[in-house]
Amino acid sequence: MTSSVSGTSNNIVAASDVIITGTTGSDAMTVFRTPGGTLGAITYVLNGTTVKLAGITSFTFNGGGSTDAMTVSLANGGPLVPGFVVFNGTVNLSNSLTVDAGGLPVRIVPQSFTLGTQIVNFGTVGPVNVNNAASANTYYGPDTADRNQLAGLTAEQRFVRVMYLNALGRPGSLAEINGWVSVFDATPGDQSQKQANVSGQIEKSPEGRDHLVRAWYVAFLGRQAFGNEEQGWVSSLLQGQSENQALSGILASAEFRNRAQTLIATGTADQRYVQALYLLLLNRAASASEVSGQVGALASAGSQGVALGFLQSGELRGYLIQSYYEVLLHRNPSTSETSQVSALPDDAVQLRFDFDATAEFFNNG
């Protein structure tokens, strides 16, 4: 059953799928899990009016204005509904979407976020904010809780603090920030070269590598790293191993293989392993022929070789580029933008560093 709700009632409504239609003005919609409620018990607030719903399997908000805004929050209790949450904006790219992942890893593909198990789909939005994510695809989740510490800074200080929030997961002290501003000012070359030098050093620092590996533990092993167990991977990265090589090692581990058996309900151990790679890296189910092909490749390439193939694939590269726009630049890209960036010769990791060096990141990151 599908129910259309005006948003003017504060009664509890029980239905399978709910569609909310906004006004022709600028609507503000927030939806979250009702505190203490079970899956499908959600609360939404539309333009100040609160409505509680129960028994919901999907939730759709169709905006009707030119500057509609939707916030989807998992901050107080995991997935909201067993199906989709959808935001359909209008043709105006001033419509904005904010997702609060509540500390979960986020998998990003065009017009869709998967926050743990909750899927949020969207169409026709401009500004995008991904908050409180443990990771984004195969890289770190920025510290957004401390993003209010950008006010009153110079442009260079702001750039460095954003790099700290993104790559280190903390805001950094003013002394730390000013130290990097000195490095920024002393770097020869143009603005882009100054940004590239500072961002590269911060991202590739021991702390930056540790932040990245810890994000991998959450995203792919489903747990936090304990003690200093991640330091072996960190050391490998600091010694020059590529991110893809290091992550493929984690994906080839017995622990990930064992987790794959719990993530996928059916199939042999090898089939479940392959399907888990499709799920966590490409955010989709694999076809029978894809599974068969990759299982066959395990015999010749091994688990690490197969995992590395996923990490180097054009499909994952496209998703990473999409996510760089949304996580680093806070906006949804056009199809032509993602195509142009994808055609560049840099690998996916270097492309992330390239984003750090853009004028748009300096101004809006």
Image (spheres, rainbow, N blue to C red):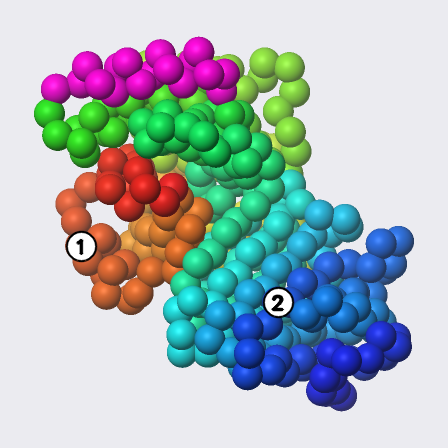
- Left or right position of 257 against 140: right
Quadrant the C terminus occupies: top left
| Magenta segment includes 181 | yes
- Left or right position of 194 against 9: left
Quadrant the N terminus occupies: bottom right
At a point 25% along the width and 20% down the height, the residue shown is 184
Q: Which residues are magenta?
A: 172-188
Find residue 28 and name its label.
Answer: 2
Q: Secondary structure at mark 1?
A: loop
Kindly identify the amino acid type of the residue bearing the numbered disc 2.
Ala
Examine the rendered structure and indicate whether residue 111 appears above or below residue 303. Answer: below
Measured as percent of width and height from the top left, residue 34 is found at 82, 59
- Left or right position of 86 against 307: right
Measured as percent of width and height from the top left, residue 238 is found at 36, 16
Find residue 343 and name its label.
Answer: 1
Find residue 257 and name its label.
Answer: none
At a point 12% along the width and 30% down the height, the residue shown is 190
Q: Name the magenta segment's main secondary structure.
A: helix
Of all residues, the one furthest to the left in this rendering is: 189
Kindly identify the amino acid type of the residue bearing the numbered disc 1.
Ala
| Magenta segment includes 341 | no
> Is the C-beta separation of discs 2 and 1 under 8 Å?
no
* First in sequence: mark 2 vs mark 1: 2
Of all residues, the one furthest to the front in this rendering is: 152
